[in-house]
Amino acid sequence: MNLVLIAEQTLNGLQLGVMLFLLAAGLTLVFGIMNLVNLAHGALYMVGAYLTTYFHQTTGSFALAVLLGLAGTLLVGIVTELVALRTLYERDHLDQVLATFGLILFFNELVAILWGRAAIYSTIPDYLSGHVQITAQLRYPLYRLVIIGIGLAVAVLLWWVVSRTRLGMLIRAGASNRAMVSALGINIRLLYTIVFGFGAALAGLAGLLSGPIYAVQPGMGELILIQVFVVIVIGGIGSIRGAFAGALIVGMVDTLGRAFLKPTLATVLSPTAADAAGPAMASMLIYLLMAVVLAFRPEGLFPSRS
Amino acid sequence: MAFSPRTWILLALLLLLAAVPPVADYFGQPFYLDLLRRVMIFAIAAVSLNLILGYGGMVSFGHAAYLGIGAYAVGILAHYGINNGWLQWSLAIVASALVAAAIGSISARTSGIYFIMITLAFTQMLYYLGISLEEYGGDDGMQLKVRSQFSGLIDLNDASAFYYLVLAILAAFLYLSRRLVNSRFGLVLQAARSNEARTRAIGFSPYPYRLAAFIISGAMCGVAGALLVNHTAYLTPEFMNWTRSGELMFMVILGGIATTSGPLLGAAALLLLEDVLQGWSVLPKWLHEHWQLYLGVILVLVVLFARRGLASLLPGNEHHD
Amino acid sequence: MHKPTATLMAVLIAAAFATTPAFAQQKVKIGFITTLSGPQGVIGNDMRNSVELALDHLGRKIGGLETELIYGDDQVKPDVGKQVAEEMLKKHQVNFVSGVIWSNVMLAVAPTVTQAGTFMIGTNAGPHQLAGEGCNELFFTTSWQNDQTPEAMGKYMQDAGLNDVYLMAPNYAAGKDMITGFKRYFKGKIVDEVYTRLGQTDYQAELSQLRSKSPKVVFVFYPGGMGIQFLKQYSEAGLRGQFPLYSVYTVDELSIPAVKHAALGQLETRYWSPDLKNPANQKFVGDYGKKYAGKLPSFYGAQSYDGMMLIDSAVRAVKGNLSDKKGMIAAMRKANFNSTRGKFTYNQNHFPIQNFYLLKAVAGPTPGGDPVMAIQKAVFTNHKDAYAKDCKMKW
């Protein structure tokens, strides 16, 4: 194993990690503040990818498409919140899981009606494609570096919003004591709608970033959603810090597992046994990690204060 | 024993189900036997889920795992030429109970969202495990060449005999879960659901009760898995897909959570609805092809406005709270 | 019970059990099982479109008889597929069941149908279980045995003297079968064999590993959505120019619109291509475009079209006597119809003995339009599958 490869795989892990973080941040915010389990978060990711791809095709400008896509996902998120989710805040998790499971079916089918069941074409704009020479031996796709950059920027921005702004103060207050916040005359409903829309926009951002490199098709959200749940459970549900740590851990473990588990096993097992066990174990690795974390810390690594 | 109106209705429902084979036979429509048999198998799985989800307040988002374990237990023994049903089904029950004990020992320590997610994660692990088991067909699964054999006592290749066996097991499990829920064990379980602190205060630690319920529920669902693999005559890791777990939950809540007849009503409603929606070729193509859209809407509406489920339409009241 | 209620009940019961008389059947009933809902519905849709086109070409009459087609959705679930098949057999009493995309659904459906004494005409899935010991006289397929296509690629790469090959496939049964089929004919050096998670979306980690091993060529199997993501990421990682990519079932007429230029230069093997020059195929491809907004059909469609033509040839041979199953089996064994792949024969396991070609994704006829698959050369002529020898069926 050479160092360049390890460095490259670390970048890959980081890139997967920030992508998971963008999704996990919205999900964990919504859970932490509204106590809502939103399985349909992946559907918003899909909506972001579809809207951006659609606007990219119709306007021809990727930058404009990104803005329209983000705004569109925000809008879809807010409408969903107003129409369906609002009444679910006071319900138990079971109702939330089921209703949002229904929303997944609804959105997947709606997208299939609007754009067909086949994956649609989406591509990276020319100015973001190509490679960057990082060291003499290591070159890395520019677009993936952009994803890492945006993800880290969002993490910093979120940290700033949550810890330094009035909105952040309300968010923190809302997470620890809802009744008190509304008793102080804050419009809690409005706060919820804002937070949900914000989470939806983050999911949309993840979706629009992933559109050009993944397949934009109905059901694309569910493929990644379960990993995102693993992230927030490991990190501690409701905690942005936890989501960030969890996302990076899961991104790294998954990537490094896929890359190095088989060669490592081959040094102790026979090649055929390593061939059989390597990929199977790599697929289960993050779930195993989650079980271990929960066995020792049932509230995740960074439990939120509430 | 004085029966409540609801019990009478449930008994009537079971009697009605018992009347299906001769009626279907009379009309030359044996297909309905298959359809209802599948409904009842899923109803058994839903009964088992209702036990922990409804009465125990443990929202398991991974109950399809035991459907899979039960199916694999039968399928793997059959793969090695062991077709003895007693052996196969015992293994299905024991294996499901053991897996449930392992998963439960970790997950019953958590609650709420953590419980939902950890049960989901374990089932995903088993799903990927199933896919990578090449010996047993991996993702392709494998055919069950011979159905479970019960030393000539009952022949599962006989459609109506198999039907009555499933019906009998369903009735037995309904009775069993009812007894369990009303026993001291069940009362502690329900108490822990509604108020954990108070339960602890009166001297019960909920953990062993929850774990035991989780194991019993897993074992019951394992039986449903053994039935399902015999019904389909086919074994596939797809039985453990996470959407199946979601469907089982949907059945429980659609039928009426924490009611005796709920799981049966829910399984029947969902599977028959699916069959009707996708078979509606009288509707324009674009309409019946998108039945999942309506199913999604129905699901949301049921949760928002009819959360006590179909069982609440029955007379009488089973809720004591 | 009030009288109206009683009448209503009677009507309801009668409706629920509405049957078509089993006697004096003047009508051919065909149950076509495919995936119509969910993301995979795109394949089912192409199959259904092609079945409808076949019916148009036959004047809506199979074998000269009035024809009813019943479509069923398997939702990619084996148990649902089986239930749909049971419904078709027992409720609709179909004469033929056809279709089925997935191997696992096929393995659940085919025995159900043949045990009921009904024909199963597969139009996609060709699992080895049904080609070998599990062959059945009522089972025919108009597609291929799963291994045949990668065998053709193995043969081509072997003949071309390519070496240092890197193999990649999803970690599931079909993925392993594809690699096994490939290795049956390719005897050169294999750098590594990598299996990825089924349904994986991101392949960057595997692509980094691939680059570090510097193979000469790469062979992959990534069907459906996985193929779309793999191709995009392969081009984006700049590997396209570095390591030529060969594949099976990864690039087709359904995925090209989603990847466009990222598919250019891709080499695939297949038994059929839209540009295959024979009258039946030109009619099929031309009329498909006319009927469905200028779209190109995929091989899924071509097989399904052939399935209807095969059934038509059998019903014609027995002059509409649908109870003459022996006669229909004998007729189908002759493969006496104008297949979109050209003339082919059936092996004794009822899988086609057919040609396989090397295809390349090249720029399409319209500038700026989607790439198209074009035949480069024949790799196999009259290729038999490897499992027929285990089939005990006697003709």
Image (cartoon, coloured by chain):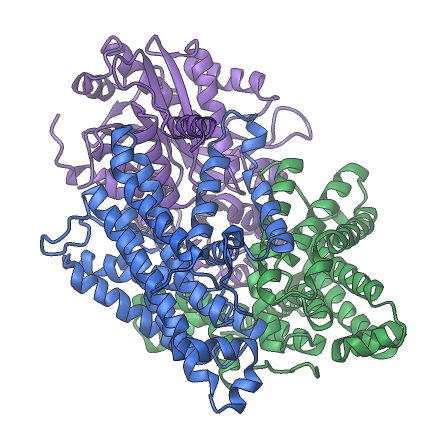
Chain colours: A green, B blue, C purple
Residue nearer the viewer, C235 or C43: C43
**Residue C372, image quadrant:** top right
Task: Name the residue: 40% across, 18% down.
Answer: C68
Instruction: Estimate the x, y position of residue B184 in percent, counting from the top left.
Output: 40, 80
Instruction: Estimate the x, y position of residue C264 in percent, counting from the top left.
Output: 58, 38
Instruction: Report how many numbered discs are placed on residues in the image.
Output: 0
Q: Is residue C57 left or right of residue A172?
A: left
Residue nearer the viewer, B272 or C176: B272
Residue nearer the viewer, C309 or C283: C309
Instruction: Estimate the x, y position of residue C360 in percent, counting from the top left.
Output: 50, 34
User: Is residue C307 at all visible to an observer of this figure?
Assistant: yes
**Residue C196, image quadrant:** bottom left
Task: Name the residue: 23% across, 67% down.
Answer: B91
Task: Name the residue: 18% across, 19% down.
Answer: C330
Task: Name the residue: 84% across, 73% down.
Answer: A182
User: Is residue C194 at all visible to an observer of this figure?
Assistant: no
Q: Quadrant of the N terminus of chain C?
A: top left
